[in-house]
Image: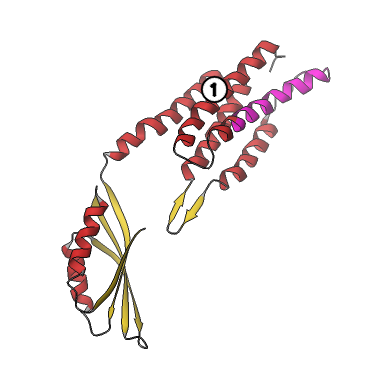
Amino acid sequence: MPYLTFGEISLRLLLSMAAGVAIGYEREHHGRPAGLRTMLITCVSACVVMLLDPLLSRSAGLAPPADTGRFVQGVLTGIGFLGMGTIIREGMTVRGVTTAALLWLTTIVGLCFGAGQFALAFIACGVAFFALYVLPVLEHNMPRDWNALITITLQSDGASDDDIRRKLLATGVRLKNVAFEHNIAENRRTLHCDVVQRTSNAFDLAQRILHEMSECQALIAIHIADR
């Protein structure tokens, strides 16, 4: 890498700042843990690391080394720990995976700008914008499976397991797995049913399930949760 002028260094840093802000804006708008400031700092930091190698060589009066793999490896290792902090598990739901992936991509964009690979950096930014702004529109109109855990509690002498199975299937769901729990002391039993249904409106399906199950004899409680 040749020696860099002040203008070249400034250009690469400014492009890194712009990319970090553009990617971080979408995350900030959706209230994600790694938003505008995190993406900006990450992208600029990666750019600075790539600039540091030739700058240190110039200050020592040496030719810039050709191998920058150690710098890249150190940055990507560090960003892996930062990305882990954005992944949050809430009950059966895992959030933050997309944010962690964007942190990884933003870091690589900063490395590309720092190395002067502008075309590659712009292509990576284009992929990020496509994933953030175009794909959500396509996903919204795409039919998808709704996975749920239905917990049905009733008295031991209530509706039979086969009756409950027929009522669930009547709503259009597909049973993936069923677990049985019997509480002899309290004279009640509980069925944990993993179901899946290709639907665009999970709320309507939940209403149908509640309507069917409400007719079960000796029903105590129904709990429906996303898987």
Q: Residue furthest bottom?
A: 185
Q: Is residue 155 within the magenta segment? A: no
Q: Is residue 51 within the magenta segment? A: yes
Q: Position of residue 14 (x, y in %)?
A: 60, 19
Asked if residue 153 lies left or right of residue 212, the reply is right
Question: Does the image show residue 49?
Answer: yes
Q: Main secondary structure of the magenta part?
A: helix
Q: Residue furthest right?
A: 60
Asked if residue 86 lies left or right of residue 115, the reply is left
Q: Which residue is mark 1?
A: 18
Relative to residue 136, is residue 226 depicted above or below? below
Q: Position of residue 192 (x, y in %)?
A: 33, 70
User: Which residue is found at the position 22% from the left and 81% from the top?
Assistant: 158
Please tell me in which quadrant of the rendered image residue 176 appears: bottom left
Q: Position of residue 31 (x, y in %)?
A: 47, 40
State how the image is colored.
secondary structure
Relative to residue 192, is residue 69 depicted above or below? above
Which region of the structure is painted magenta? 41-63
Question: Does the image show residue 116?
Answer: no
Please tell me in which quadrant of the rendered image residue 2 appears: top right
